[in-house]
Amino acid sequence: MKMSAPSLDDRATPIPVAHPPHATVGSTAAPGGLLSGPAVAGSAVTRIGILAIQGDFDAHARRVEKLGAGAIFIRTPADFDGLAGVILPGGESSTHLKLLDEECLRKPLVEFARNGGAILGTCAGAILLAREVHNPAQASLNLLDISVLRNAYGRQLSSNVCTLLTTLNDAPLEMVFIRAPIIESVGPGVTILAERDGHPILVQQGNILAATFHPELAADLAVHHHFLSLARKAASR
Ligand code: GLN
């Protein structure tokens, strides 16, 4: 196990956010509000929204685009229109919760989930999805039947990288943990796709997928690939 990881301690500090409609980057705007990407009509592309109010959203966009889907940064309720899937990135879950409410994004997000939309939550995103949050107790969206303990790895292990098998395929997956939570318990409807030291680290319930690590920081696209297949199936129903 390697004991070093990219230092992302600055994630504790909220990043000031501008609020362009359907965030587009520079002159790379593509059809349909996509950040950039496939040179086909926006409507033909699987559109994945990434909550972009704080934290680690950009790396997810790069992963999604690498797999041929379109990435949209979610900053306003209208950004949910036409999405096949939503990614809740890492960052600081307490800040995300606060900003979700301030930006009126909680309602459309919960509606998206209740309508069967596919959601991937990574680290802080997994904490947001949980039914119950401890250390300290914190409100959450209750969209995934798991109970989590925030910042649960000791100081020495608070950020680290390990390589473990998942049920997604036969290839061991590099996993970057940054001040990660531990999933303490899962409900009966939750499938465990990977474990570390006896604790689930990648779980799925219906179209909701959550990882306590950061798949967007590793080269292997397996988690995003699986998520995109969920999103495409959900969107085609
Ligand atoms: N420690 C953060 C929290 O509890 C999560 C860290 C992360 O997303 N890398 O919200």
Image (tube, rainbow, N blue to C red):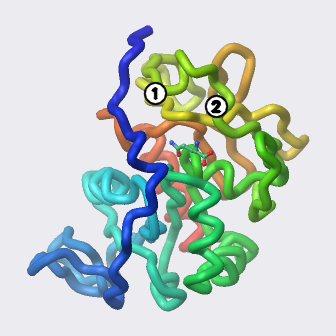
Disc on res. 51: none
Badge 1 amino acid: Met
SS of the residue under disc 2: strand
| In front of the other: 70 or 91 | 91
Mark 1: is the Cβ under 8 angstroms from ligand 1?
no
| Residue to which mark 2 is pinned | 201
Q: Residue furthest right?
A: 188
Please report the residue visible at 46 percent of the width from the left and 21 percent of the height from the top: 160
Measure the alpha-carbon separation of dots 1 and 2: 10 Å
Mark 2 belongs to which amino acid?
Answer: Ile
The quadrant of the picture occupied by the N terminus is: top left
Q: Reading the chain from its start, which is encountered first: label 1 or label 2? A: 1
Q: Where residue 109 sits: x, y (%)?
A: 64, 75
Residue, disc 1: 175
Q: Is residue 12 visible?
A: yes
Residue nearer the viewer, 17 or 169: 17
Q: Which of 210 and 137 is in front in this view?
A: 137
Above or below, 230 relative to 51:
above
Instruction: Find residue 82 and report its horizontal and vertical position in percent.
Output: 48, 84
Secondary structure, mark 1, is strand
Residue 223 horizontal/vertical position (percent) = 48, 41
Residue 166 falls in which quadrant of the image? top right
CB-based contact (under 8 Å), mark 1 and mark 2: yes
Q: Can residue 220 be seen in this view?
A: no
Location of the C terminus (image quadrant): bottom right
Q: In this view, does 27 lie above or below 97?
A: below
Number of other residues with Cα within 10 Å of mark 1, as a class: few under 14, some 14 to 19, many 20 or more: many
Residue lying at 42% horizontally and 40% vertically, measured from the top left: 9
Q: Which residue is drawn at 35% across and 90% down?
A: 21
| View quadrant of ligand 1 | top right
